[in-house]
Image (cartoon, grey):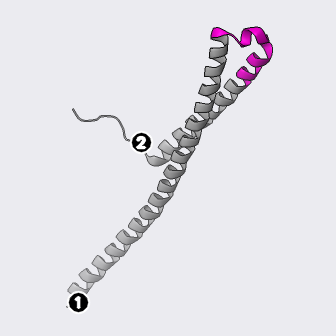
């Protein structure tokens, strides 16, 4: 079965990944704030025991993981941005080459007509 999904252009993909990265970073900051509030508001004896302690610890791990994922996504965005720039240059050169080829064909046709 052929893939019927529309293939996105790289600039669109880059824009999407940048938006996802911004949202991921925002959520990570929000989680940090929630964690800090919970640490301050939950009494120490409760905070240090059982499920609450495990939940706080897990929340901090998730927050750290989100930071790593955001950094990885930043690396991907940089590679995508470089590829977008490289392709723009290649497309410009291709357009110039096509124009040169058309000129050369016209000159050859003109030379044949004058023989």
In front here: 8 or 65?
A: 65
Q: Are marks 2 and 1 in contact (CB under 8 Å)?
A: no
| Quarter of image, res 2 | top left
Give the crowd class for mark 1: few <14, some 14-19, many >=20 residues within 10 Å: few
Q: Earlier in the sequence, mark 2 or mark 1?
A: 2
The residue located at (58%, 31%) in the rendering is 65
The answer to if 16 sits in the magenta stretch is no
Q: Disc 2 to disc 1, how far (Cα)?
A: 49 Å
Give the number of the disc on residue 114: 1
Q: Secondary structure at mark 1?
A: loop
| Quarter of image, res 108 | bottom left
The residue located at (71%, 20%) in the rendering is 34
Q: Please, what is the dominant secondary structure of the magenta stretch? A: helix
As displayed, is residue 50 above or below residue 88?
above
Instruction: Report the side of 94 relative to 37 (left or right).
Output: left
| Res 24 visible | no
Q: Which residues are magenta?
A: 33-50
Screen quadrant of the C terminus: bottom left
**What residue did someone put label 2 on?**
8
As displayed, is residue 74 above or below residue 109?
above
Give the crowd class for mark 2: few <14, some 14-19, many >=20 residues within 10 Å: few
x and y percent of residue 52 in the render?
A: 66, 11
Q: Secondary structure at mark 2?
A: loop
The answer to if 43 sits in the magenta stretch is yes
x and y percent of residue 14 in the render?
A: 51, 45
Camera-nearest label, 2 or 1: 2
In front here: 110 or 92?
A: 92
In front here: 97 or 52?
A: 52
x and y percent of residue 17 in the render?
A: 53, 40
């Amino acid at each position: 079965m052929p893939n019927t999904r529309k293939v996105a252009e790289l600039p669109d993909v880059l824009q999407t990944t940048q938006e996802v990265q911004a949202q991921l970073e925002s959520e990570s900051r929000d989680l940090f704030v929630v964690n800090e509030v919970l640490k301050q508001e939950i009494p120490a004896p409760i905070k240090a025991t059982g499920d609450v302690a495990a939940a706080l610890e897990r929340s901090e791990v998730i927050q750290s993981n989100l930071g790593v994922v955001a950094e990885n996504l930043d690396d991907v965005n940089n590679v995508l941005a470089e590829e977008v720039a490289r392709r723009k240059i290649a497309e410009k050169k291709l357009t110039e080459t096509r124009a040169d080829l058309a000129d050369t064909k016209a000159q050859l046709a003109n030379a044949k007509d004058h023989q």
